[in-house]
Image: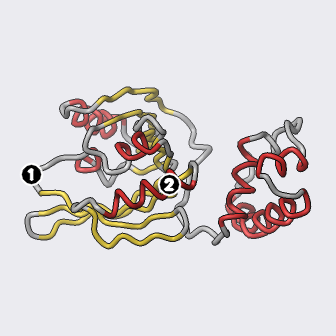
């Protein structure tokens, strides 16, 4: 399978511009696109990460954007439509249904989108990238190669975590709790979170209990 890793940035991105402005990051799952009248509609599902006050500012600012419709907010996760005039192009305008995302799109706090996409024919990737290069985007090709597919993301509804559970899990991952050898102990993570060891342990264990069944179901045996 032909796989490409891309990094791109465009000044009219409703997510990227706000990630940079409010110093947050986002992980998004691409959904469908459709046209109605003189407009294109792009579905977004995004989960924001960062300081809660910055995330709140991001969401408040997004609510003021007239191109955003049907915005639903659940914790730090957002679902909405972006309404774009048909004559205007954005990166997903050039999206070919023969291409699929291997991983969610990650948007960093500098406003850069990180894409990992795949397809069976190299010329399909090349055409897609050439169309992007014709636009006024900042685009960098990090990789294009034919490789065995070993890692693919299947979008699904994730288990609901409370803010405390999600925060505990984020702190654990960011500080190497799941690394080998382990880089931090629970007492260290509790101190970072500013709560007692017993409370932090409870939040983390409940988060693990909610997500582990889905993770196990999606783990594939190494060939």
Q: Foreground residue, 78 or 125?
A: 78
Q: Quadrant of residue 21?
A: top left
Q: Foreground residue, 100 or 58?
A: 58
Q: Sequence-wise, which precedes: disc 1 or disc 2?
A: 2
- Residue 24's place in the image compared with 76, above or below, is above
Q: Quadrant of residue 159?
A: bottom right
Which residue bears the numbered disc 1?
87
Q: x, y (%) of residue 196?
A: 87, 58
Q: x, y (%) of residue 113?
A: 41, 40
Q: x, y (%) of residue 84?
A: 18, 57
Q: Quadrant of residue 71?
A: bottom left
Q: x, y (%) of residue 173?
A: 73, 46
Q: Foreground residue, 91 or 70?
A: 70
The structure residue drawn at horizontal position 71% and vertical position 61%, both measured from the top left corner, is 215
> Which of labels 1 and 2 is toward the front?
2
Which residue bears the numbered disc 2?
55
The structure residue drawn at horizontal position 41% and vertical position 51%, both measured from the top left corner, is 100
Q: Is 98 left or right of 176, judged from the image as shown? A: left
* CB contact under 8 Å: marks 1 and 2: no
Element type where label 2 sits in the image: helix
């Amino acid at each position: 399978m032909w796989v490409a890793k891309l990094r791109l940035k465009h000044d009219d991105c409703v997510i990227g511009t706000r990630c940079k402005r409010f110093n947050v990051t986002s992980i998004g799952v691409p959904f469908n696109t459709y046209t109605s009248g003189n407009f294109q509609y792009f579905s977004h599902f995004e989960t924001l990460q960062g300081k809660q006050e910055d995330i709140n500012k991001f969401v408040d600012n997004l609510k003021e954007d007239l191109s955003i419709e049907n915005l639903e907010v659940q914790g730090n996760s957002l679902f909405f439509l972006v309404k774009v005039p048909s004559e205007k192009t954005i990166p997903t305008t050039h999206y070919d249904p023969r291409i699929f995302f291997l991983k969610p799109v990650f948007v960093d706090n500098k406003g850069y989108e990180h894409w990992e996409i795949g397809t069976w024919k190299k010329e399909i990737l090349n055409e897609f990238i050439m169309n992007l290069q014709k636009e006024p985007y900042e685009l960098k090709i990090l990789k294009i190669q034919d490789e065995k597919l070993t890692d693919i993301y299947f979008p699904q509804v994730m288990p609901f975590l409370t803010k405390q559970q999600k925060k505990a899990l984020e702190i654990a991952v960011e500080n190497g709790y799941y690394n080998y050898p382990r880089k931090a102990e629970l007492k260290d993570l509790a101190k970072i979170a500013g709560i007692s060891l017993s409370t932090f342990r409870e939040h983390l264990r409940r988060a693990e209990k909610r997500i582990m069944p889905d993770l196990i179901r999606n783990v594939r045996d190494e060939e």
